[in-house]
Amino acid sequence: MRGKEMDQKVLHIGIISREDYKKRTLAIARGEYRPQPDEPKIWFESLQSMAQVLSNENLLLLRTILERKPESLKELEAATGRSSSNLSRTLRTMARYGIVKMERVRRKIRPVVEATDFTVQFSMYADAHREDGRDAARI
C-alpha cells in the first residue's frame, strides 16, 4: 500500500553498458542525439547492479522511511536495526540515483523518499547492429 501523503513518483531507469553510455553521452554532446522526455534519466550498467540498489532489503528501507518519516538517521537506525554505517552507505548510493534525498535539518540529516515506483528499460542490443555485423532487428 502506498503512503497516503506522498504522490507517486516514477523513476525511469535504463540498463546500458558503460561503453554504450559513453557513446550516448558523446552523441548528445555533439548534438547528434536528443534524448526523449520519456527516456531514462538514471542508468545502471547491469541488471545486477540495479538489483543491488533496489534489493528487497532496500525496498523495505524505503517503505520504512515512507511510513515512519524518521527525523534523523538515528531514528531510522532504531526503526530498521541496521547499523549507521550501513544506512549511510545505502542512502548515499540511493541519493546518487535520485531515489532518496538527504535533507539537512539543523544538525540532523533526514532521509526523504523521492521515488516510489520504478520502470526499467533495456535492450539486448543497444545499437542497431550487433558486433558480428547482423542487424539486431533481424535476430
Image: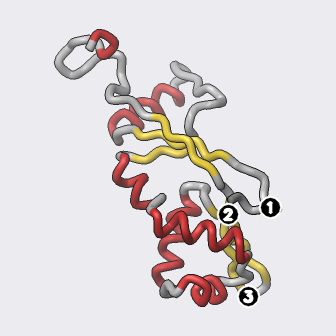
Q: Give x and y (percent) for residue 116.
A: 65, 55
| Residue picked out by circle 2 | 113
Residue holding disc 3: 107
Among numbered discs 3 and 1, the one appearing first in the sequence? 1
- Amino acid type at circle 2 is Val
Amino acid type, callout 3: Arg
Give the amino acid at mark 1: Lys
Instruction: Name the front one of labels 3 and 1.
Output: 1
Relative to 84, residue 103 above or below: above
Q: Report the quarter where the C terminus lies.
A: top left
Q: Earlier in the sequence, mark 2 or mark 3?
A: 3
Q: Label 1's element?
A: loop
User: What crowding class fits label 1: few (fewer than 14 Cα within 10 Å), some (14-19), or many (20 or more)?
Assistant: few
Mark 3–mark 1 Cα distance, whole angstroms, equals 28 Å
Reply above or below: 22 against 104: above
Q: Nearer the viewer, residue 51 or 35?
A: 51
Q: Give the residue displayed 47% in from the left and 26% down from the top.
A: 27
The residue identified by callout 1 is 4
The answer to which of marks 1 and 2 sits earlier in the sequence is 1
> Residue drawn at (71%, 77%), measured in percent from left and top?
68
Report the number of discs.
Answer: 3
Give me the residue at 63% from left, 89% from top: 74
14 horizontally vs 131: left or right:
right
Residue 76 occupies quadrant: bottom right
For this view, does 131 lie left or right of residue 15? left
Whether the residues at callouts 2 and 3 have beta carbons within 8 Å, the answer is no
Task: Work out how far the residue at label 1 is from the one at label 2, CA to CA, in angstroms.
Answer: 13 Å
